[in-house]
Amino acid sequence: MRVAVLGGDGFVGWPTALHLSAQGHDVVIVDSLVRRQIDGELDVQSLTPITSPKERRDAWKEISGRWIELVRIDLATDYDQLRSWLLTWRPDALVHLAEQRAAPYSMKSPRHKRYTVDNNVNGTHNLLAALVETGLDAHLVHLGTMGVYGYSSVGAPIPEGYLPVSIELPGGRRAEQEILYPSNPGSIYHMTKCLDQILFAYYAKNDGLRITDLHQGIVWGTNTPETLADERLVNRFDYDGDYGTVLNRLLMQAAIGYPLTVHGTGGQTRAFIHITDSVRCIELALGSPPAGGDRVKIFNQMTETHRVRDLATLIAEMTGAEIANVTNPRKEAAENDLVVENQQFLELGLEPTTLSAGLLDEILNVAKRYRHRVDTRHIPCVSAWTEEIAQALARERRPQLKVIGGEGD
Amino acid sequence: MRVAVLGGDGFVGWPTALHLSAQGHDVVIVDSLVRRQIDGELDVQSLTPITSPKERRDAWKEISGRWIELVRIDLATDYDQLRSWLLTWRPDALVHLAEQRAAPYSMKSPRHKRYTVDNNVNGTHNLLAALVETGLDAHLVHLGTMGVYGYSSVGAPIPEGYLPVSIELPGGRRAEQEILYPSNPGSIYHMTKCLDQILFAYYAKNDGLRITDLHQGIVWGTNTPETLADERLVNRFDYDGDYGTVLNRLLMQAAIGYPLTVHGTGGQTRAFIHITDSVRCIELALGSPPAGGDRVKIFNQMTETHRVRDLATLIAEMTGAEIANVTNPRKEAAENDLVVENQQFLELGLEPTTLSAGLLDEILNVAKRYRHRVDTRHIPCVSAWTEEIAQALARERRPQLKVIGGEGD
């Protein structure tokens, strides 16, 4: 299959491109490389020393004998280039990961809010418009988020995209319908994934595009079998307050002797998936396209749920790290339950890699190995959801490094 | 009250600005004037000879003694200017009509699709982000569309924005919830109003913005008491295939002796509202802001529903015009029923101006008076919803002018 991985230089994109290439697909990466620019903007770097796009692709060629082309296109701004490339390369499938994907970054300032909306909506819409204009019948697999559902469930497990409801009609009759699960985003970033859903539903209905939307939980872990094949293939590990996700961030904190920062009470229950499963799910989704017609196929791409404070306790017990409850920069419920259906991927053969001491240890070792690369000033989450929260954060004394881990220690 | 009318040079915006000014409010128009540019792009003009932004505002000053300032800002691109202006002028309320509002125009080409999404989403989002950044507690009244609901009702009257549903829980229990009515847009334009809804819901929840969304039916008529006060105040009358709305278009066709073009069987049932009521509804919404908190207030801004072929028959009987059933450029159900709730505006005192021979005659007279300004080449709707429909339209023989009405005839 000819597969384009849009955003294929990123955290999920890179191991996805390698895995699909290893499976024998003809893979091209389409990426604007803006994520590397944002590292510069934030003055941070991946905890792991990721190599340049060229070096990592050369290394893959050396190891696998397979070449992955890189096409530099910004989906949000380079429509004509996107269209020409589609007509030339004619992909069978597109994996769309080319969006700004950090909730805290999307809340950092009005500029960041506006960038996230503009970039994500126009990028996704340009892709859809270009597929219609070129007449390509490629399967589009998009990475959504569990966050489209919101975290305040009605008490029923969150279904995979569509919710059966009963509506009262005149005369006491009732109509049974299946509707797109009502969206309830918790940040500007999550909101853009809700907007994407509306775009997909429309283009599937009007133009018959074949679209799969993967509502993913929080990804943890760093490497996959392919990125472990050579150090130059190492995957990105974000530890900063904007791009670092909770489990990886806690492990990095344990590795350098920084208190485990838990937002509020840590009563937030979240859905998780290991990076290896994330990549595997994308492969499974590619192998199981919707028949076409007018409905987007939606999967919940997660394998387990955990409460944040339970994760912190687990890691504290493993490592002896302290826990620091800090002001939550997000406007959200302090505590929530979360039950999620994920039957579809299990039926397609996914064997979940769930949280285990062994895997946590592996990540801890990655974090320890590169801890000299951590800039502790960038650990706290300082992007606040409202002005009121920003003021509370500014007043708060930040946790301090307890153990200074030296280089080579 | 200090009210800004965004898009105040347009078809609904101009009579709204005049009416609010006449009611004693301090009114400013914020407009990029792009709608006049689009007339140039399409090589058409309003059937009525609208005057320049300066001349119409000078005339209003002469007649009413009241001055309406014009601020040229493009919401989608001039964020910094928007923010500065908000901080200087400090409106109590904003009426947001500054979006690309024609469904056929939004389907004209990939460029038009992309412009409509980019312009409408970024314009609305910039406004929301600027309100949060400036901390202004202004009431935002936005013009949505009945089209967010789609035209295939579940069999119950369409409620005003929120639908009560019953959801099955484990153990046979049920949860009763009110959700945002599931959106089902019929064009790229309508889709952008669905995206707006998600933006509004988010900003109301996270930032407490006070927002009212008016889901309006198809507007008919031209003038309001204020635009009739002087010929220089005349309102826009679009008759072309992109911007002309169905009832006004049929009346114009009758006035010039062109067959009344009915798309498909004309079995589409649509919601309608007279321009005078549209303006009055906006006034009523401004006087009844949401208390704040976290929910957007939604009104259905329509007064009656009609099937398109019934309107064509009515006008044919009035005028002796022929009816021509032509290929429907839209991808939609050939026939639909539509029942809509509009209790909220009636309770606030709206006295509907419903379809009557007298009013139709008035519009017919406007059309007759200016028929020398019609370019019949631009009457057919040629913007097709899909490539397949575009080909069918290209094969079809167009209706011809039966009676040539000369100037002064």
Image (spheres, coloured by chain):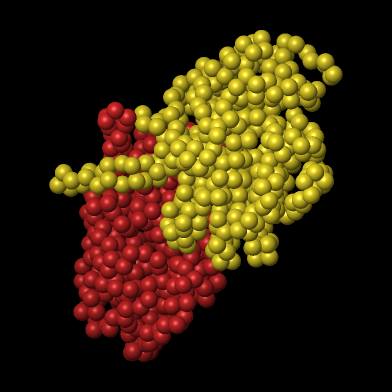
Chain colours: A red, B yellow
User: In the image, is A348 to the left or to the right of B13?
Assistant: left
Tell me where residue B277 appears, x and y as whole percent.
59, 36
Front residue of A189 and A85: A189
Tell me where residue B56 appears, x and y as whole percent.
79, 43
Q: Is residue B346 above or below residue A335?
A: above
Q: Quadrant of the C terminus of chain A?
A: bottom left
Front residue of B199 and B317: B317
User: In the image, is B364 to the left or to the right of A81?
Assistant: right
- Count of residue discs: 0
Q: Is residue B296 above or below residue B386?
A: below
- Residue shown at the point (45%, 37%) measured from the top left: B343
- Residue shown at the point (40%, 59%) measured from the top left: A186
Q: Quadrant of residue B14?
A: top right
Front residue of B194 and A223: B194
User: In the image, is A303 to the left or to the right of B77?
Assistant: left
Tell me where residue A253 appears, x and y as whole percent.
34, 79
Q: Is residue A4 visible?
A: no
Q: In the orientation shown, which residue stands out farthest toward the right?
A: B408
Q: Quadrant of the N terminus of chain A?
A: top left
- Residue shown at the point (75%, 29%) measured from the top left: B47
- Residue shown at the point (68%, 65%) measured from the top left: B88
Q: Is residue B111 above or below residue B382?
A: below
Q: Is residue A183 visible?
A: yes
Front residue of A358 and A3: A358
Tell me where residue B388 appears, x and y as whole percent.
54, 25
Q: In the orientation shown, which residue stands out farthest toward the left?
A: B171
